[in-house]
Amino acid sequence: MSSQDIPEENLPAEQGAAHGAAGHGGTAVAQRVDEDPFHDPGLPAHKPRIQDIDERAAKRSERTVAVLFTLSMAATVAFIACFVVFPVDKLVYIWPFGRVSALNFSLGWTLGAALFFIGAGAVHWARTLMSDVEVADDRHPIAASPEVKAKVLADLAAGNEESGFGRRKLVRNTMFGALALVPLTGVVLLRDLGPLPERKLRETLWDKGKQLINMNTHEPLRPEDITVGSLVFAMPEGLKHDDHDFQIQIGKAALMIVRIQPEDIKDKRELEWSHDGIVAFSKICTHVGCPISLYEQQTHHVLCPCHQSTFDLSDGARVIFGPAGHPLPQLRIGVNAEGNLEALGDFDEPVGASFWERG
């Protein structure tokens, strides 16, 4: 059905007007047919910005961009400072957030500010100093011709010149500074993967003169308390179960004490570090750090229940079976003036499972 078959009152107003005009000579219809309904309106006329015609305004924009980049650098430095200054467990009251972690709150705001000022500086630079001339270009084949490649390179060079990247050294240098400092936030966050070990993995609470305390009775151990074939567990004097770091400290200082006939001890140093056949070894397995508790008095072997590493306590606690990589560390012991067993120093090597820089 053509428009001529539709009643005139049902036609769109514009088409009805054209239809009515056509009824009076047809000149409007001919004009509509010749007109392209998808014609290209073209680009509006370019209007220069104040920075394009006034160098003082351009300088002001340049200083504004530099200030934003500088603020980003300051925020990055503040991020690192907050990470160092605020302890991880410090809480502060900040309205309207309430009680929050001082570390998390400060890190979030400073990192957000560092990224925001970089973005704001880049946007302000693009809107006020870079060229804003719109360029229309026809579509071209995917495989660019040599002429197109040459044009792209020329446009790139022109864009570089128009951006002022080479001329406006203040903007360029402060931008480089901001972009160079922001990645430091990620490097600093690596520090939060865990506390620095320092020498904590190499040292325990054992020291010269510290008495051996029975872990069951919490009384100092005396030589007569330990009989041949018995197994006793001890901890350092001064360590208490209600200490906040008890589990950390006992995980390194737990001691296993057995009494062996001196003539049955095969290792010379083990005999020298013992007292009347009483030897003290770390209770922590050197495989993955499980506590050892299975003792066979006839063979003087101890067995780790986790992965069956077996150590010979009569021969320097050397490994005779299982995945453990080295013997149990021995603690040199003696007797003090009160007749109680005491340590004569710390372990001569780190206890427990191996770690990456053990040695």
Image (cartoon, helix red, strand yellow):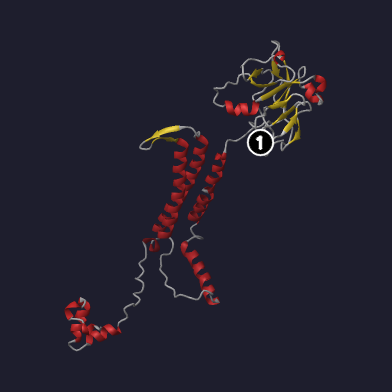
Residue drawn at point x = 82 percent, y = 25 percent: 268
From this viewpoint, is residue 67 visible? no
Instruction: Say if 89 sits above or below 279 in the image.
Output: below
Which quarter of the rendered picture does the C terminus lie within? Answer: top right
Q: Position of residue 297 (x, y in %)?
A: 74, 24
Going by the image, does 198 lie left or right of 141? right
Residue drawn at point x = 16 percent, y = 78 percent: 9
Going by the image, does 335 lie left or right of 44? right
Instruction: Say if 106 sits above or below 168 in the image.
Output: above
From this viewpoint, is residue 24 visible? yes
Taking depth in this image into account, of 128 and 259 the one nearest to the observer is 259
Q: Amino acid at mark 1?
A: Val
Q: Position of residue 47 (x, y in %)?
A: 35, 67
Residue drawn at point x = 50 percent, y = 64 percent: 160
Taking depth in this image into account, of 47 and 87 the one nearest to the observer is 87
Residue drawn at point x = 73 percent, y = 32 percent: 310
How many dots with numbers? 1
Looking at this view, name the residue that lies furthest to the top.
338
Residue carrying label 1: 288
Going by the image, does 200 lie left or right of 301? left
Mark 1 residue element? loop
Q: Position of residue 280 (x, y in %)?
A: 72, 23
Taking depth in this image into account, of 13 and 75 the one nearest to the observer is 13
